[in-house]
Amino acid sequence: MSMLLEMLGQHAHNLSERIALLDGDQQITYADLLPRITQKTAELKGSQCRVIGIQLDNSADWVLWDLATVAAGIVCVPLPAFFTQQQTEHVIRSAGIDHLVTAQGLVATGLADTVDLPQGTSKITFTSGTTGTPKGVCLSQQGLEQVAQSLVAVIGADHAADHLSILPLAILLENVAGVYSALLAGATCHLYGLAQIGMGNPFQPDFQQLALKMVLHKISSAILVPELLRGLAYTLMQVGVRLPDLKFFAVGGSKVAPELLLQAQALGLPVYEGYGLSECASVVALNTPASALIGAVGKVLPHIELSCEDGEILIHNPAFLGYLGAPQHGTFATGDLGYVDTDGFLHISGRKKNLLITSFGRNVSPEWVESALLSQPEIAQAVVFGDAQPYLTALLVPLTVQADLDAAVRRVNEGLPAYARVGVFHAIAPFTVAAGMLTGTGRPRREAIAKQYHHLICEGIQA
């Protein structure tokens, strides 16, 4: 039986009156949680589902259906709202989804053909990665729950009294590191529709609304990507609001500038950077209140076996069973460059495949320079190029039309060695998922950006 479901059974006795799931429409206690899951499980079995796709906004129902698939032994495929219709159709076909859970309930897709999945597959998470076609990552339930269990062990259960899901539940980081961990800890999961908390458009959030919701509901923990942390910190500074109940703010998904963490801490935000991969069921390493180092992504979770070879991070026991159509066995090469220091902290220096080699023969990780650029308040988005060129070119999205990009780039260059400085830059329109320039989690799709702005890469304003 699932360790998570067993723990929920214990909570039903020990924390019976505590609210487990809360979304504005529903308030479900731990005593009521398993019976509600059982109802959904019966519906799934009655429909003879094999692979189910969840296509819902954040809500208590999303979590109930997800846990019902665990109880029923059915493969679950979360469907992100930010996927295009074409991407969603690709996911349904490639995963063999025969039923969808939508706002209208359980709906058959009409697909009857089964798809050959790795044995033990419980969840398939799709990531668009650097191409437009989403790639299915097959994961075991044991691997998913092991991550959640390790997070509770290293963070402590008391930090998750009231957890707010800010990211879409279809993103593995929120699904596992957020909700699963909070439920194991016996916390209350706040699962409001994204528009209700200012996240209706995740790439143009209403940070003031988000902050006010966090104050109103006395939120103690949440997970953010760096861009959301930056926007929230700026808003808190501008409007003078603070989050007194917040105990743990995890930040991950991409590299976080140390300056941003320091700015957030100055506002009283208990921010902790982490690092993870879909293939490892979300989190690999995390800073915690008991052990933190700015500039590192934290210590490796206790269940993870990790090593670094030729600068690349290798995971020896991932929850990863393989991509759809390509079973995985043994060690997973992450493609990330990094090292573990003598105190056990993991440091990420960039992506192996994104490494730039300038015409002067210098190696530069674009994430390093981009992180420095994004620490400047004038810059909303930044992508750096410069392979085989004498200087780096930056494509910059200004935060406002009045933003002084010249001054921002000068400040960044002052803190970089000569070989890693931005030589030219261009102010451009925002990168978006719809335009094919970002992945669903906000990472730049470098090949698409380079193709779109090829004519600008090597010409522009001297920095």
Image (spheres, rainbow, N blue to C red):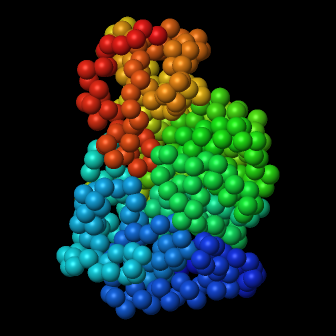
Whether residue 346 is visible to the viewer of this picture, yes or no, is no
- What residue lies at 70% left-to-right and 76% top-to-bottom? 19
Q: Position of residue 444 (x, y in %)?
A: 39, 37
- What residue lies at 40% left-to-right and 60% top-to-bottom? 81
Q: Is residue 242 above or below residue 150?
A: above
Q: Position of residue 262 (x, y in %)?
A: 70, 32
- What residue lies at 27% left-to-right and 47% top-to-bottom? 132
Query: Is residue 118 left or right of 371 when viewed as pictured?
Result: left
Whether residue 218 is visible to the viewer of this picture, yes or no, is yes
Q: Position of residue 249 (x, y in %)?
A: 67, 49
Q: Nearer the viewer, residue 199 or 70?
A: 199
Q: Nearer the viewer, residue 92 or 24?
A: 24
Q: Position of residue 67 (x, y in %)?
A: 51, 76
Q: Is residue 382 above or below residue 422?
A: below
Query: Is residue 241 left or right of 281 when viewed as pictured?
Result: right
Q: Is residue 409 above or below residue 125?
A: above
The residue sitting at the front extreme is: 402
Q: Nearer the viewer, residue 277 or 47?
A: 47
Q: What is the quadrant of residue 84 in the picture?
A: bottom left
Q: What is the quadrant of residue 366 in the picture?
A: top left
The residue sitting at the left extreme is: 113
